[in-house]
Image (spheres, rainbow, N blue to C red):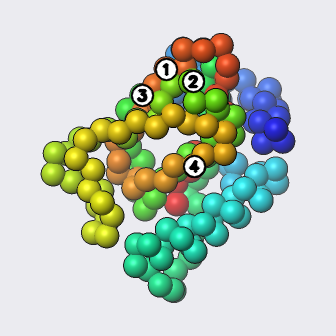
Amino acid sequence: EQLKNEIDSMRKKDPVGRRVSNAYTGWQSHDGCDNNPAFIKCIRSIKRMMRDEVMLHLGVKSGFQVEFHNCWANINDNMAWNRPHLHNGCFMSGVLYIKADGDEGNFSAIDTDARVVGAHPVMPKMKESVQFQPRTGTMYLFPSGLMHMVEPNLTDKDRYSISFNM
């Protein structure tokens, strides 16, 4: 609830936000959530999980630093969605759902290459597109070069999330 309230406050201060992949009436903050005091505990947890779980799974044992490239907030209200896009130029990307009941539009990973989508040799290769129903507290991590989108929110509920690149 605290993070949702902070995102509402950010939108009130900057009602236009920015337009990147968000479509229709969706709002997106400018970068900087990773430096916002309200998000520090959350960001610290994401970094720790990347360092202690994901990097070890990928075979990286030590000698690395997990750093955020950028982080921003999203609000997708009725009919808002995010167009298919990539986050090229970073290692991993992710989204953490701050408020989502699962019926406000799926997160879709889109297969753009019949051979390989993932670029990491120890990761399973995706042969087809997959969809996930976002729920509060769920985080999806993916290679930054993975084409993805968020389907339109067909409910009257707002979906809140933060997205990031590392």
Question: Could you tell which of marks 2 and 4 lies nearer the N-terminus?
Answer: 2
Front label number (2 vs 3)? 2
Which residue is rendered at x = 64% and y = 29% of the image?
Answer: 101
Side (left or right) of 131 relative to 164: left
Question: Could you tell which of marks 3 and 4 lies nearer the N-terminus?
Answer: 3
Residue linked to disc 2: 104
Secondary element under disc 2, as helix, strand or loop, is: loop
Q: Nearer the viewer, residue 136 or 28?
A: 136
User: Picture coordinates of residue 46 (x, y %)?
Assistant: 63, 61
Residue linked to disc 4: 139
Residue 83: mark in rendering: 3
Residue linked to disc 1: 152
Q: Is residue 108 visible?
A: yes
- Quarter occupied by residue 149: top left
Which residue is rendered at x = 22% and y = 47% of the image?
Answer: 127
State the separation of the CA atoms marked 3 and 1.
Answer: 9 Å
Secondary element under disc 3, as helix, strand or loop, is: strand
- Quarter occupied by residue 35: bottom right
Image quarter hosting the N terminus = top right
Secondary element under disc 1, as helix, strand or loop, is: loop
